Image (cartoon, rainbow, N blue to C red):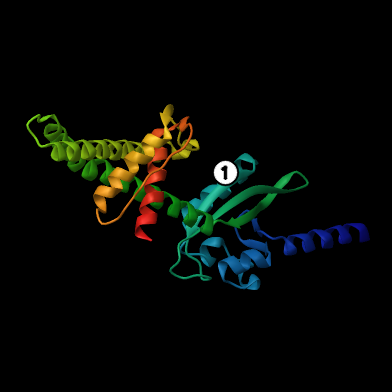
């Protein structure tokens, strides 16, 4: 009586107000009920769904897939969760959309009279995942460029500087310049390797540091010498006081010093 009617009214109100799409299909997959959320997803009024099949309402979505999902539920009597559908709907012509669906049997007196469907649109999630994949692919291509197009010419520079530096007949200024080029080139090689390492271990949560005992004053002089060669019109003076020995990642410290000194020269 009244209790059953009230329970049915509460159930109907809950389904209609649910924040996800819902539909009830009979055994022939004709819509018996649909809530406003799913009707809006489809872009077709709720009343126009009743008595029709999803294939009639959404002709651009695979009929074989829909029928396969329904068959799994009706034949096994088991719910099927996290099923995926994709296609276009009248709500957004020309836009490929994606849905995550949960299909379950609806029973009356033990007999399966139809199929209930819960629908969540995941188009934005899929697009975001695609953007992440595209960014990862771009990063991999950039790393390949860094690995190949920078390594090779830098190796040639380091080799040439090494040969010049070993020439005992070269004038002292030339010999000193070669040593500085060699040191800078080797540091660039290490930075390239670290950049590639960073790309490889990014998914693992970061890049490890290789700490060694080093003299910060020596590192400052090296960075100042390198930048002084690149900007001979600038004046870079280094003064240190007290103990400057510590336990750090030498390449990272040199990178930070070079950035600081370089910014000072530029600005």
Q: Nearer the viewer, residue 151 or 22?
A: 151
Seen at 64% across and 54% down, the residue is 117
Residue 236 x %, y %: 34, 50
The outermost residue toward the right is: 2
Judged left or right of residue 185, residue 30 is right
Would residue 200 be seen by someone viewing this image from the given angle?
no
The outermost residue toward the left is: 169
Q: Nearer the viewer, residue 210 or 132?
A: 210
- Judge whether 93 appears above or below 213 on screen: below
Quarter that holds the C terminus: bottom left
Judged left or right of residue 16, residue 237 is left
Seen at 42% across and 44% down, the residue is 256
Residue 167's quadrant in the figure?
Answer: top left
Q: Which residue lies under the disc numbered 1?
A: 72
Would residue 229 be seen by someone viewing this image from the given angle?
yes
Count numbered badges in the picture. 1
């Amino acid at each position: 009586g009244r209790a059953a009617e009230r329970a049915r009214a509460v159930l109907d109100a809950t389904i209609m107000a649910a924040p996800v799409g819902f539909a009830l299909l009979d055994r022939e997959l004709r819509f018996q009920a649909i809530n406003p959320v799913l009707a809006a997803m489809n872009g077709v009024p709720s009343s126009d769904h009743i008595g029709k099949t999803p294939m009639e309402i959404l002709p651009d979505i695979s009929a074989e897939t829909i029928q396969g999902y329904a068959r799994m539920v009706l034949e096994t009597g088991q719910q099927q969760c996290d099923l995926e559908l994709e296609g276009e709907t009248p709500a957004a012509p020309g836009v490929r959309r994606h849905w995550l669906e949960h299909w379950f049997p609806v029973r009356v007196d033990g007999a399966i009279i139809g199929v209930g469907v819960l629908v969540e649109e995941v188009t934005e999630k899929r697009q975001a995942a695609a953007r992440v994949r595209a960014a990862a692919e771009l990063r991999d291509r950039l790393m390949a460029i860094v690995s190949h197009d920078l390594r090779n010419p830098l190796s040639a520079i380091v080799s040439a500087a090494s040969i010049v530096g070993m020439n005992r007949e070269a004038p002292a200024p030339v010999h000193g310049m070669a040593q500085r080029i060699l040191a800078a080139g080797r540091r660039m090689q290490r930075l390239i390797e670290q950049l590639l390492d960073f790309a490889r271990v990014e998914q693992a949560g970061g890049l490890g540091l290789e700490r060694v005992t080093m003299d910060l004053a020596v590192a400052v002089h090296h960075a100042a010498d390198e930048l002084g060669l690149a900007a001979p019109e600038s004046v870079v003076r280094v003064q240190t006081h007290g103990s400057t020995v510590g336990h750090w990642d030498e390449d990272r410290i040199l990178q930070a010093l070079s950035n600081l000194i370089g910014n000072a020269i530029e600005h």
